Image (spheres, rainbow, N blue to C red):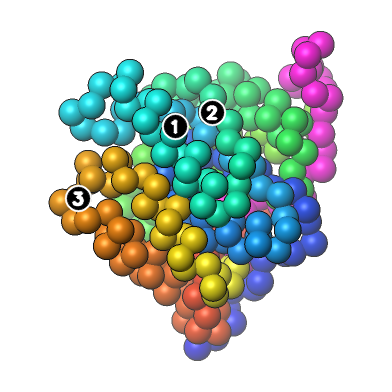
């Protein structure tokens, strides 16, 4: 066992987690969120889509509200009570000015010191291609962290918050280049409950009972980088200093 991964910074109060779809944050990241909220830190969620294209055989009109409700329940399970959804289309999220602007406005509104997002790189691991929505959102988050502080790039409308340049770090979950980790000891039950909250989505992916599948996945994810973090269950991140 080694301490190859450094501990994540703890000297912050507010975080904003930004992901493409409902359920993205529950595949491991929620365990770290549970650890942070239990310590009194404020975490808000921003979902770029409602995940309306994510359940095979279910119409977007039905899937969108269902997945939104399941995401709110999943967030509450780990102590997150502020969940916002944008109106970008699931499956065809485009990196560009509209997305960057939406994210910059959200960063100005929530004023996070820590931004959390999902892997923006081309691959999850060598040979496993990442999806377009994850790549687009992750890269837009990296740029929006700077955009949020520049009133000339996206001048705020009269009803929008002023520029915010207080982002200190961006934590990229599921990155193939992790540098830091969070000890998630004691957060197993909350992490499982958070993933199980997406029961409709999980049932569309597997015939295995959602709780059984979620339990196995949470345990696998908690142990995946433990050998690089002193043997402790952890969630790893690629930490980018802003």
As rendered, which of 29 and 228 lies closer to the eye?
A: 29
- The percent coordinates of residue 186 (x first, y second) are 54, 73
Looking at the image, which residue sits at the far bottom? 1
- Disc 1 designates what residue? 68
Q: Is residue 171 magenta?
A: yes
Q: Earlier in the sequence, mark 3 or mark 1?
A: 1
- The percent coordinates of residue 132 (x first, y second) are 39, 35
Disc 3 from disc 1: Cα separation: 20 Å
Residue 78, quarter of picture:
bottom right
Disc 1 secondary structure class: helix
* Residue under the image location 42 percent in, 22 percent down: 89
> How dense is the environment of label 2, judged by Cα within 10 Å: few (below 14), some, or many (20 and up)?
some
Disc 3 from disc 2: Cα separation: 26 Å
Q: Quick check: marks 2 and 1 in contact, CB under 8 Å?
A: yes
Q: Earlier in the sequence, mark 2 or mark 1?
A: 1
Residue 147, quarter of picture:
top right
As rendered, which of 226 and 202 lies closer to the eye?
A: 202
Q: Earlier in the sequence, mark 3 or mark 2?
A: 2
- Disc 2 designates what residue? 85
Q: Which residues are magenta?
A: 151-180
Q: Is residue 15 above or below residue 160?
A: below
Q: Is residue 166 magenta?
A: yes
- Disc 3 designates what residue? 206
Q: Quick check: marks 3 and 2 in contact, CB under 8 Å?
A: no
Left or right, 225 with reference to 163: left
Q: Is residue 167 above or below residue 109?
A: below
- The percent coordinates of residue 155 (x first, y second) are 79, 17
Observer-side mark, 3 or 1, equals 1
Observer-side mark, 2 or 1, equals 1
Left or right, 73 with reference to 100: left
Disc 2 from disc 1: Cα separation: 8 Å
């Amino acid at each position: 066992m080694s301490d190859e991964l450094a501990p994540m910074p703890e000297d912050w109060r507010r975080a904003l987690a930004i992901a493409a779809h409902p359920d993205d944050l529950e595949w491991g990241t929620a365990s770290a969120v549970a650890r942070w909220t239990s310590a009194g830190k404020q975490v808000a969620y921003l979902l770029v889509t409602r995940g309306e294209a994510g359940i095979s055989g279910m119409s977007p009109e039905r899937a969108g509200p269902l997945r939104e409700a399941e995401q709110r329940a999943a967030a509450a399970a780990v102590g997150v009570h502020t969940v916002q959804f944008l109106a970008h289309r699931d499956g065809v999220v485009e990196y560009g000015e509209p997305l960057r602007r939406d994210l910059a406005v959200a960063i100005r509104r929530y004023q996070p010191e820590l931004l959390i997002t999902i892997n923006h790189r081309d691959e999850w691991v060598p040979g496993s291609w990442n999806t377009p929505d994850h790549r687009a959102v992750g890269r837009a988050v990296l740029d929006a962290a700077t955009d949020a502080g520049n009133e000339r790039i996206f001048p705020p409308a009269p009803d929008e918050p002023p520029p915010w340049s207080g982002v200190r770090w961006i934590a990229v979950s599921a990155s193939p280049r992790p540098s830091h980790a969070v000890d998630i000891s004691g957060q197993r039950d909350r992490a499982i409950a958070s993933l199980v909250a997406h029961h409709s989505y999980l049932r569309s992916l597997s015939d295995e009972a959602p709780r059984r599948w979620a339990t196995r996945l949470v345990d696998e994810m908690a142990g995946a980088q433990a050998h690089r973090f002193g043997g402790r269950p952890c969630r790893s991140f690629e930490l980018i200093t802003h």
